[in-house]
């Protein structure tokens, strides 16, 4: 592929050098160049969607109830209380609500975060999927580095709570490097009721602790705190 500089260098040898429909054309030559994109230009930051992460929901809350709760604050495009993928009739205790604008989403956060629904105070925040990078394949480890202030202890877990569920919940607050409920060394099929989540950034870990401690997951109120140093 010829560069623009190479084309300009060849121009004096040709009869003409003219732009032609977005191409540089040199007569008496087969050399041509499509207009090239500027790969050096910085990509514009991706704007957040007007999508809310709603946690600590009573299992009896239906999608229609979410529409009624959040409807007064704007146009609700979609509202979905997440189902257990192994038992679709069973709710997970957290949901996503999408508005038509960020202004509406922010108004809903201001008005409903902490609001009690069926006796449970909701936790409402902006969902930021761009903060969470694709999950690594199971067994693939992140580059080893100090995880002080990035590692969270998650206790009082139901034995049925999967690593994927932990990842889905905590990744709403940032890039998750590791999420797992620990298993018994003698019997790996037996869960131990607690686990750890490691974030890429300490601010994400702190935000998750502030928002998720006490969240009900699979019927149990989980305990979330910064993990103690292993040193």
Image (cartoon, rainbow, N blue to C red):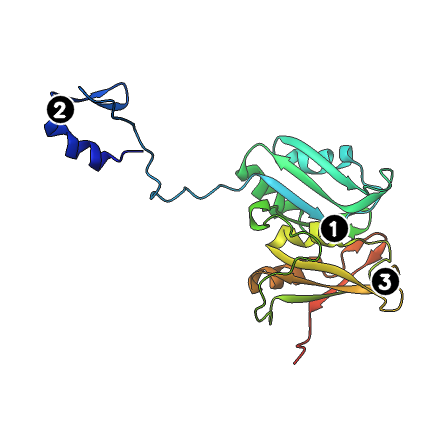
Can you see residue 114?
Answer: no
Q: Which residue is mark 3?
A: 188
The residue that appears at 65% across and 63% down in the rendered structure is 198
Q: CA distance from mark 3 to mark 1?
A: 17 Å
Indicate the quadrant containing the C terminus: top left, top right, bottom left or bottom right: bottom right
Residue 164's disc number:
1
Q: Nearer the viewer, mark 3 or mark 2?
A: 2
On the picture, is 41 further left or further right than 156? left
Towards the viewer: 222 or 164: 164
Determine whether 14 is above or below 9 in the image: above
Element class at badge 2: loop
The residue that disc 2 covers is: 14
Judge depth for marks 1 and 2 and give the one in front.
2
Q: In what element is the residue under mark 3?
A: loop
Above-or-below relation of 54 to 98:
below
Q: Nearer the viewer, mark 3 or mark 1?
A: 3
Residue 162 screen position, x and y as percent: 79, 53
Q: Is residue 163 above or below residue 195?
A: above
Quadrant where the image shows the N terminus:
top left
Does residue 52 appear left or right of residue 184 in this picture?
A: left
| Position in image of residue 75 (x %, y %) | 62, 30
């Amino acid at each position: 592929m010829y560069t623009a500089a190479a084309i300009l260098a060849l121009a004096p040898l040709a009869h003409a050098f003219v732009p032609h429909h977005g191409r540089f054309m040199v007569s008496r030559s087969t050399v041509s160049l499509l207009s090239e994109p500027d790969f050096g230009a910085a990509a514009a930051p991706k704007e957040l969607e007007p999508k809310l992460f709603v946690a600590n929901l009573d299992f009896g809350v239906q999608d229609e109830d979410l529409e009624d709760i959040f409807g007064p604050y704007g146009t609700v495009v979609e509202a979905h209380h997440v189902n257990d993928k192994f038992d679709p009739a069973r709710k997970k205790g957290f949901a996503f609500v999408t508005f038509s604008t960020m202004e509406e989403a922010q108004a809903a956060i201001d008005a409903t975060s902490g609001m009690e629904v069926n006796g449970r105070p909701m936790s409402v925040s902006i969902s930021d999927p761009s903060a969470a990078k694709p999950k690594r394949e199971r067994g693939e480890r992140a580059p080893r580095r100090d995880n002080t202030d990035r590692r969270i202890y998650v206790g009082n877990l139901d034995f049925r709570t999967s690593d994927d569920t932990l990842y889905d919940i905590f990744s709403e607050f940032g890039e998750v490097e590791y999420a797992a409920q620990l298993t018994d060394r003698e019997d790996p099929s037996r869960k131990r009721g607690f686990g750890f989540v490691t974030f890429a950034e300490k601010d994400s870990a702190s935000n998750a602790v502030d928002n998720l401690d006490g969240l009900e997951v699979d019927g149990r109120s989980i305990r979330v705190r910064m993990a103690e140093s292993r040193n």
